[in-house]
Image (spheres, helix red, strand yellow):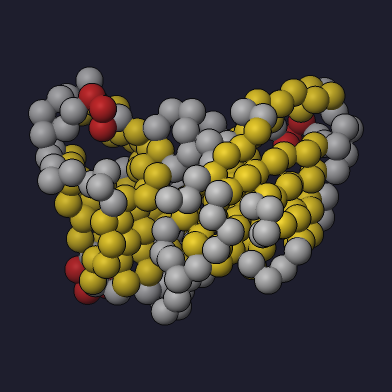
Amino acid sequence: DTGVSQNPRHKITKRGQNVTFRCDPISEHNRLYWYRQTLGQGPEFLTYFQNEAQLEKSRLLSDRFSAERPKGSFSTLEIQRTEQGDSAMYLCASSFGWGPGEQYFGPGTRLTVT
Amino acid sequence: KQEVTQIPAALSVPEGENLVLNCSFTDSAIYNLQWFRQDPGKGLTSLLLIQSSQREQTSGRLNASLDKSSGRSTLYIAASQPGDSATYLCAVLKAAGNKLTFGGGTRVLVKP
């Protein structure tokens, strides 16, 4: 069990560029979650997957954001046409089971949009 | 809509003093409550998870209590150490829900 991993750990991009982040959950965890945390605030839910199905999306997830989890393994979060307001820590978590359970978090990807 | 509040937002104590961190939530229909630690620029480390049917959980110097009916949880850290300096976040998972709702965190500084 190597824990949840996220890549890259840091990303600096210019406004208007597209970025993609990757999350590898704990093996055999069928649920995967994305959260966003801005400076000085608690994380906010973005979306979650059960296996490959995206079952819930927050209103925070504008149409510039898209998340995928092909084959129910790793997940990617893409932000198109980045804006300065997208600067945040993007956290991924995973859990096991078919109902609510303990979520294990990765180290996060810090995005800075200049 | 579930709202989670943590007071105080920041706390500074001398080494050796006990820490008391508070978390309140508006909707008592929760499945569980988790306390996390976050170091600057890092991800979240789970400290304790309390199921809705439990009143408290303990791990080493940490003890967390849950009063679901009043919408409150308290994290106690005994005999604080400088290494306990971090931000502590509480989060609730609603019954039949899938997303954690977080408080804003309490930033703790333990002075040697």
Residue B2 in percent (x, y) is at 47, 51
| Residue B85 seen from this side | yes
Up-down: is A27 above or below A7? below
A72 or A46: nearer the viewer:
A46
From the viewer's perspective, is B10 left or right of A7? right
Q: Residue at x 58, y 43 (%)?
A: B89
Rendered-image quadrant of the C terminus of chain B: top right
Q: Residue at x 64, y 52 (%)?
A: B71
From the viewer's perspective, is B83 left or right of A26? right
- Number of on-image labels: 0
**Farthest residue, direction bottom:** A98
Q: Residue at x 24, y 66 (%)?
A: A54
Residue A16 in percent (x, y) is at 10, 28
B25 or A48: nearer the viewer:
B25
Residue B58 in percent (x, y) is at 79, 59
From the viewer's perspective, is A86 left or right of A93? left
From the viewer's perspective, is A34 left or right of A39? left
Q: Residue at x 50, y 68 (%)?
A: B95
Residue A57 in percent (x, y) is at 26, 56
Up-down: is B68 above or below B84? below
| Residue B36 seen from this side | no
Image quadrant in which you'd find residue A108: top left
